[in-house]
Image (tube, rainbow, N blue to C red):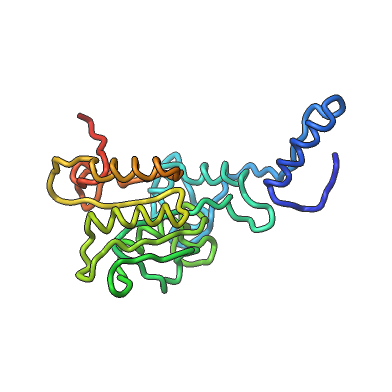
Amino acid sequence: QVQISESSLEKLETLSEQLMTTYPGEVTSATYDSIQDAHIYTPEDPFDDGVNWTEDAPAGNNWGFEAVEMASAWEIAQEFTDIKTNRFTNVTTGVVDDGFDLSHEDIGSVKEHLYYSSTPITEDHGSHTSGIVGATWNNNKGIAGICQSDMILVSASNDSKQLTTSYIVNGLTDAVIHGAKSLNISIGSGYPTTSDGYPAASLIASLYTQGYDFLYVQSAGNSSYPALYNGFFSSITEK
């Protein structure tokens, strides 16, 4: 074993590779030491039922996170945690929605807030969605968000608080241009559409052609309607 001063995970990985490259005969394998924990890593915010996580039988306030085995994913993510800051390797997340309450006590790290109305729109749906994505961990308030990364929040509402297709396109585009790598959009409507996936397909093709690297994630449905009804992203159905 060789002990060095504490550094970032990236620097330790680079040093390990350098040792194997520089001393191929003497060093056959090099890696950094890490603390192992047999317990699943979970936050302790009150509406996540504290330390009570049961992925094998989802229930309670955090049943959604349990159903997708979020705690197990967090355990894996700890391998990519920055040693000094104790934050997951930072990938900026974008959330495009109707509006956001930036004064909410449990809102996570907001890198940037974009909007197209004359003044910022504050709406419950966007606040709810951004909380699922990035609410602050272990602050004894609300829930713990899925990610602990910085967020770019984009309100795609007009002055009448209407979420429009044109503003959604602008929002997804601007979020990517401003540095978001993973983007969430939760939209839906109450009627089927014949333009399934066309707006998003055109937008994604244009941004990829320009060299941007990103991932869009849409809701499986919204307002009790399946994604087939959203008219923006391509839907996946049993048919």
x and y, in percent, of residue 158 in the image: 23, 66
Name which residue lies at 68% across and 47% down: 9
Q: Quadrant of the C terminus?
A: top left
Quadrant hosting residue 160? bottom left
Judge whether residue 67 can be spotted in this image. Answer: no
In this rendering, position of residue 17 left or right of residue 211: right
| Position of 168 relative to 36 (above/below) | below
| Position of 202 relative to 97 (above/below) | above
x and y, in percent, of residue 71 in the image: 51, 46
Which residue is nearer to you in this view: 214 or 146? Answer: 214
Which residue is nearer to you in this view: 36 or 196? Answer: 196
Quadrant hosting residue 202? top left
Judge whether residue 146 can be spotted in this image. Answer: yes
x and y, in percent, of residue 114 in the image: 38, 65
Image mark count: 0
In this rendering, position of residue 147 left or right of residue 231: right
Q: Quadrant of the N terminus?
A: top right
Point out the residue furthest to the top here.
25
Which residue is nearer to you in this view: 173 or 113? Answer: 173
| Position of 159 relative to 188 (above/below) | below
Which residue is nearer to you in this view: 78 or 8? Answer: 8
Name which residue lies at 64% across and 52% down: 82
Name which residue lies at 14% across and 40% down: 194
Point out the residue furthest to the front here.
210
Quadrant hosting residue 171? bottom left
